[in-house]
Amino acid sequence: MPRKPTEELEAGRDYYARLLPELDVEYFATMWHLFTVGHLVATDLDRVVHKLGHSFADIHLLGSLGRDRRRALRATDLTSILYVSNAVLSTRVARLEKEGLLTREQGADRRAFELHLTDRGRALIEDAILLIAREAKIVQLFRRLPPEDRQALSRILGDMHEQLDRDFVGVPHSDD
């Protein structure tokens, strides 16, 4: 059984090309690498921030709240930003509120709650950012890339993210 990523890729591409000979499998490498690298990055970020007692999903939520102090975010804003369902967000918000990392306040229009980062939540975000900068494998790998590769990678992934984000605006998100 292949073990190296390139061997895994070739085995998968060959398998699907034989199984479905009419299928163009040119996209297979990009899709497989993005999926696998995304999973590895998420696993590593969870490993790093677990030292602070939280998941990277928690840190992402809190960081989203802390980015713009001029405007409060509602739960519906966060479901779009984080690509999660209302149920997942509601559970996470309740837990983080109980831990004193965020607050929920009645909005001006009385129909929705606004979410605010507490000082404790802000301190956790700062600790997480510093820890990620020191220990995350993706950060170390990115720093080793030549500047032109960093720029190309950021540009290509940014373009793909923009397109996919437009395709999924307003679509209910799966919790898988």
Image (cartoon, rainbow, N blue to C red):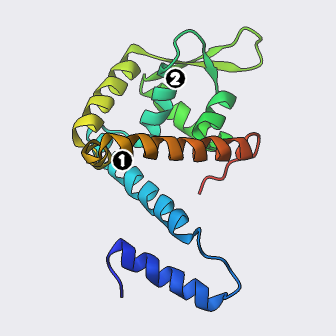
Residue 109, position as x, y percentages in the image: 77, 11
Query: Image height check: is 68 above or below 3?
Result: above
Which residue is drawn at the image coordinates 50% and 32% (left, top)? 61
What amino acid is found at the position of numbered circle 1 in the picture?
Answer: Asp
Q: Which residue is most to the front?
A: 148
Q: Judge whether 145 appears above or below 126 on screen.
A: below
Sequence-wise first label, 2 or 1: 1
Locate residue 136, reporting x and y percent. Answer: 28, 44
**Cα–Cα gap, marks 2 and 1:** 19 Å
Question: From the image, which quarter does the N terminus lie in?
Answer: bottom left
> How many numbered circles are shown?
2
The location of residue 32, given as percent across then percent down, is: 50, 67
The quarter of the rendered structure image containing the C terminus is bottom right
Label 2 belongs to which residue? 65
> Foreground residue, 113 or 40?
40
**What element does badge 2 sit on?**
helix
**Crowding at label 2, few (<14), some or many (≥20) Cα neighbours within 10 Å?**
many
- The residue tagged 1 is 46
Q: Residue at x 54, y 32 (%)?
A: 94
Looking at the image, which residue is at 45% across and 27% down? Answer: 63
Q: Secondary structure at mark 1?
A: helix
